[in-house]
Amino acid sequence: MDSLSSMSRSLAALLKERGETVAVSESAAGGLISASLLSIPGASAYFMGGGVVYTRDARRALLRFSEEEALQPGSTEPYALAAARAIRDRLGTTWSLAESGAAGPTGNSYGDAAGHCCFAVSGPTERRLTIETADADREANMWAFAKAALNLLEETIGSHD
């Protein structure tokens, strides 16, 4: 298992070098994405905040989703993109990252199997990704989701000039 800082060290350096900022909306990763970004000294230069948006109430309160938006299925790329755009707008960052999935040991109420997770990055460029770990181990999935999310963000930022 990776350490928190090893998952985001190069991403943090990239954000600092470019003078860019990020906000995070996470769900199934349970805060590991934010914790990883915050594990790097000087994180206040790039990490503006975020939240673990785990329920529909949190969607309405933290992302300011309408009732209709809050009711959409969470483990989809369109939801992840809407959450990424919302947290970016709320915190006024250059980039944002959102994830939503089913950590396990069972699937979620949307019919997704454990290990299913959708991600989105919003910023000057947008990207989406879905992964399936085919694993029912909740903690292993949380770590896999955090790592995949951070990799997607770093790849997106790195490919944007």
Image (cartoon, grey):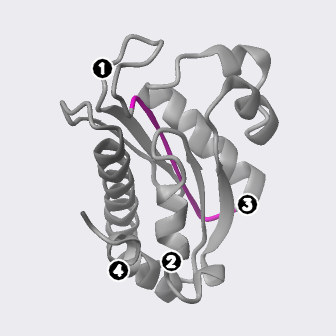
Q: Nearer the viewer, mark 2 or mark 4?
A: 2
Q: Nearer the viewer, mark 2 or mark 3?
A: 2
Disc 1 marks a residue whose amino acid type is Ala
Residue 154, given in percent of the width and then of the height, sits at: 36, 66
Using the rendered view, name the quadrant where residue 47 is placed.
Answer: bottom right
In the picture, the disc for residue 92 is: 3
Is 21 situated above or below 115?
below
According to the image, label 1 marks what residue? 113
Q: Is residue 88 left or right of residue 159?
A: right
Which tag, 4 or 1, sits closer to the chain's start? Answer: 4
Bin the neighbour count of mark 1 within 10 Å (Cα to Cα): few under 14, some 14-19, many 20 and up.
many
Is 157 situated above or below 147?
below
How far, Cα to Cα, is label 2 from label 3?
22 Å
Give the magenta-colored segment's residue range: 93-102
According to the image, label 2 marks what residue? 39
How far, Cα to Cα, is label 4 from label 1?
31 Å
In the picture, the disc for residue 10 is: 4
* Image quadrant where one finds the N terminus: bottom left
Residue 144, given in percent of the width and then of the height, sits at: 29, 50
Which tag, 4 or 3, sits closer to the chain's start? Answer: 4
Bin the neighbour count of mark 3 within 10 Å (Cα to Cα): few under 14, some 14-19, many 20 and up.
some
Q: Residue at x 45, y 48 (%)?
A: 126
Using the rendered view, name the quadrant where residue 19 is placed.
Answer: bottom right
Is 149 situated above or below 130?
below
